[in-house]
Amino acid sequence: MVQVAEKVQDVLKEPEEALVVLSGGGTSGRMAFLMSVSFNQLMKGLGQKPLYTYLIAGGDRSVVASRERTEDSALHGIEELKKVTAGKKRVIVIGISVGLSAPFVAGQMDYCMDNTDVFLPVLVGFNPVSMARNDPIEDWSSTFRQVAERMQKMQEKQEAFVLNPAVGPEGLSGSSRMKGGSATKILLETLLLAAHKTVDRGIAASQRCLLEILRTFERAHQVTYSQSSKIATLMKQVSTSLEKKGRVHLVGWQTLGIIAIMDGVECIHTFGADFRDVRGFLMGDHSDMFNQKAELTNQGPQFTFSQEDFLTSILPSITEIDTVLFIFTLDDNLMEVRTLVEQVKEKTTNIQALAHSTVGQSLPTPLKKLFPSIISIMWPLLFFEYEGNFIQKFQRELSTKWILNTVSTGAHVLLGKILQNYMLDLRIGNSKLFWRALAMLQVK
């Protein structure tokens, strides 16, 4: 990780004609989107030109909708990479594939290794290379395992890197949105933030710096799960709504809205859920987040995600059996939060809040009184320098992800969607899910 952080430092020191690309399919692509948004915000705040971009299999529509089939093409991955890197002289490509399986990423890594004068490929996943997928890729000559093995050989010369720590199997077999998604966020935000912090101070990246940031995520885990009883109550409420054929709306401000969208979308292929069952919405401005915002305009109900969409399409149709969770920090526009809560409360009493605050902040009483239950996460005042603010932002996002994953997974378990730890109603949307379904049929 230190070596990769140093490579990122090199690009930050000489950003002209350089780029950092975060790429993946499904959950991994959504994480790539979230992190590129975050680090571009960090750079803009320092008066620097944004250096990050993202690629997600299937384009921007895959950020807000389930389109798993799009990650099966290696050539699609290469074509998209060529488009965003045209004219660049130095490019770090971070390919994310939790199980080391996505052809979309494999093709990009192979292409980078064939063009090391411009590209440095970094593969991120959480399986040993020996367990990488070895099935033939339809439009490519190598398997994922062969690509990863080639990268390991090139790692000796620092022409490629494989970051694949073992995090153990998922609690729900194959549900990489859970541990895999969280580990992706922790690993890459630690690595990239360490590069930014140290380059601004004019010092080399070090294991100590990485460890300091990693420990903040450990604290986030402790703070989050101290709220277990309230999380369990929310889980039961969500399950009750779904059991009654109601809807669950996750309404988040700023990047917490992105986390909400991710959680809702991932229920579709994981549990065979309808896209309307659990849905996330992003409150606030998102004008500079997407590569191709036009892809998301007037695309139909499956692609609604914005504040305007919620107010015009969702709010009028909310019923008493629906549940609405409001996700915000006390730094957000609390008058706006209050106004929306009051509007929703006219439709349903099943409202809850997930509110993040720092020591010394308190929820205004008029807003507090609107909620029958609040999951209140209090964060310590630890960080004073600019980059430190982003550690707190990352903690809040991860905490929100853990809570939403727990709630939506647990709610579907209560609905009977899981047998032992297998998804019974998973939607077979790509080759990875086909092989997983086949393996489930062979279990005795």
Image (tube, rainbow, N blue to C red):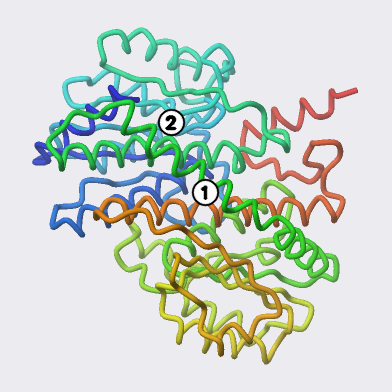
Marked residue nearer the N-terminal end (1 or 2) = 2
Query: What's the residue at 42%, 51% (across, down)?
Result: 394
Q: Which mark is on residue 220?
A: 1
Question: Residue 345 location in percent, x, y?
Answer: 66, 87
Question: Residue 147 location in percent, x, y?
Answer: 43, 16
What's the CA distance linking mark 1 and mark 2?
A: 30 Å
Question: Residue 311 location in percent, x, y?
Answer: 53, 83
Query: What's the residue at 40%, 26% (across, down)?
Result: 123
**Above or below: residue 375 compared with residue 125:** below
- The residue type indicated by label 2 comes to Val
Q: Quadrant of residue 19?
A: top left
Q: Of 168 and 291, which appears nearest the observer?
A: 168
Q: Of 338 and 155, which appears nearest the observer?
A: 338
Q: Of 73 and 121, which appears nearest the observer?
A: 121
Q: Which mark is on residue 105?
A: 2
Query: What's the residue at 33%, 26% (across, down)?
Result: 207
Q: Quadrant of residue 133?
A: top right
Q: Secondary structure at mark 1?
A: helix
Question: Residue 100 location in percent, x, y?
Answer: 52, 25
